[in-house]
Image: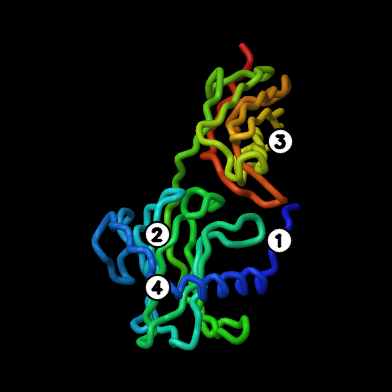
Amino acid sequence: MRRSVPWTLAVTALVAAAGCASSGPRAAAPTSTGPAVSSTTRPPNGPASSGPPGRRFTVSPAQLAIGQPVTFSGTGCASTGVVVIGIDHGSETTGTSAATYPAADGSWRRTVAVGDSTRLGTRRAYASCEPRSRIRARFTYEPVTVHIRTFRRMNVSPGTTIRAGTTLDVTSVGACAVPGNARAEVELRAPAGSVSTFPPVYGKVTQDLQGNWAARLPVPANAPPGRLELTGTCAWSRSFTAWYPTIAMTVQARP
């Protein structure tokens, strides 16, 4: 089981970071992939927003990549508060997280890079308005849906259509984060939500000091025909630091 981070400690650290960030100019907002939208429309290629008038939460752009700037903005949080924002900040990953102080009119804005450990695919961005004196939310904004992609990927040989008994050679394109510390984990498993009884199989990984890795993974000789998933992650100190896109695998029936 991955070790969780106490929410109060995490928020306290973010609030402290917000105080440091407020002492200088904030980063400029990235160019959006689409026009600004209202809370009732969320086009797949533009910024996304949520919330009633007076308490609006917007993320721009809504299509994100690991390491790319993302701008969180909103209204309705009193200037005496602090806004805690992020994507996937929790027990298994630090994800993307930050904090900022609202202006006198209650509006706020913060641009950060999408964190290396943010999960891929369709995710939920969050924001909450907190008192500065204690960790208890005044209110939480309605989450916003965003989509995360990455520059990382895996190459698998001999391919994605295999037979039981095959040995897979998997190599990374894009190193693990925190080179030398984060370790790659490669797993062949039944698809999420599947009723398959196929037990997970883990690869034997070799990794250099720059975080590049290769793995050998034997497919059991008794593996049944059907769909499997090949997953790759990087982990350090019992927390995920990076994710590779999952590869769909097909096990063919023996001739």
Task: Say which residue label 2 marks.
Answer: 70
Q: Quadrant where the C terminus lies?
A: top right
Mark 2 lies on a secondary structure that is strand
Q: Nearer the viewer, mark 2 or mark 1?
A: 2
Which labelled disc corresponds to residue 29?
none
Residue 4 got which mark? 1
User: Residue 27 location, x and y as percent?
Assistant: 37, 64
Coordinates of residue 113 in the picture (x, y in percent): 45, 56
Mark 4 and mark 2 lie on one chain; the one further toward the N terminus is: 4
| Mark whose residue sits in front, 4 or 2 | 2
Task: Tell which tag, 4 or 3, sits nearer the viewer.
Answer: 4
Q: Which mark is residue 200?
A: 3
Q: Nearer the viewer, mark 2 or mark 3?
A: 2
Q: Earlier in the sequence, mark 3 or mark 1?
A: 1
Q: Which secondary structure, mark 3?
A: loop
Give how far across and how far down residue 191 sits, in percent: 60, 40
| C-alpha span from label 3 to label 1 | 23 Å
